[in-house]
Amino acid sequence: MRIISGEFRGRILKAPPGLGTRPMLDRVREAMFSTLGPGIEGARVLDLFAGSGSLGLEALSRGAEGVRFVETETAVVQILKANAEALGASERVEILRGSALARSSWQPPEGQPQRWADLVLFDPPYPWLSNERRGPLLEAVSTLLSEVLAPGGLFVFHTPKRGVQASDFEVRFEPDARKYGSSALWYLRAPKEQPASSEDPA
């Protein structure tokens, strides 16, 4: 697995052995970052279900300001840390071992507003969308969109092709799906804050 573009282009990342994690296919990852384009420059990124860190480190390579990674498996966290260190990017990342669905994993960095993340990368295990974890997973998505994603920020949800539908999200986030073989990327944009009126109240 390699970094596709940017500062760390071509650098190889370690991946956890076995089938416990499911890295996003390179062509889907490339399509996602092509869609994100220059909007990633200077972004504060929250990478949930981070695995080896391939998504967040790609974002960092393309100009993101910093990335918080959240991963639950201790062995995978060690690989993620090794990948960040190998790129010389440790000072620009925060790595938390914990649940991606826990509110404590989303708390704003010191000095940042409550809605702090300009880009949220959400790549849960596929089976979670077809078992008892589906409800809590979609509830977490709703909370992240409303309470963590910065105004005008973007939420990217990697799902099976038919894992979710537009009606699973509030229309104000303008859900937009791009499908790639058996998978899909859902893009959800937080509304921008309306500027305060300069007119005096009547």
Image (tube, rainbow, N blue to C red):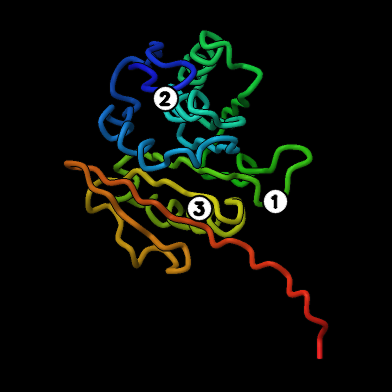
Residue furthest out toward the front: 199
Task: Look at label 3 and name its amino acid.
Answer: Ala
The reply to whether the C-beta atoms of the residues labelled 1 and 2 are less than 8 Å apart is no
Q: CA distance from mark 1 to mark 2?
A: 26 Å
Q: Which residue is mark 2?
A: 54
Task: Look at label 1 and name its amino acid.
Answer: Gln
Q: Quadrant of residue 51?
A: top left
Q: CA distance from mark 3 to mark 2?
A: 22 Å
Q: Which residue is mark 3?
A: 140
59 w.r.t. 173: above or below: above
Which residue shows up at 46% across the image and 62% down it? 173
Mark number for residue 114? 1
Which residue shows up at 44% across the image and 51% down it? 137
Q: Residues within 10 Å of mark 2 (few under 14, many from 20)?
A: many
Q: Is residue 108 left or right of residue 102?
A: right
Q: Position of residue 7 (x, y in %)?
A: 49, 18
Where disc 3 sits, the SS reads helix
Q: Nearer the viewer, residue 34 or 95?
A: 34
Which residue shows up at 51% across the image and 20% down it? 77
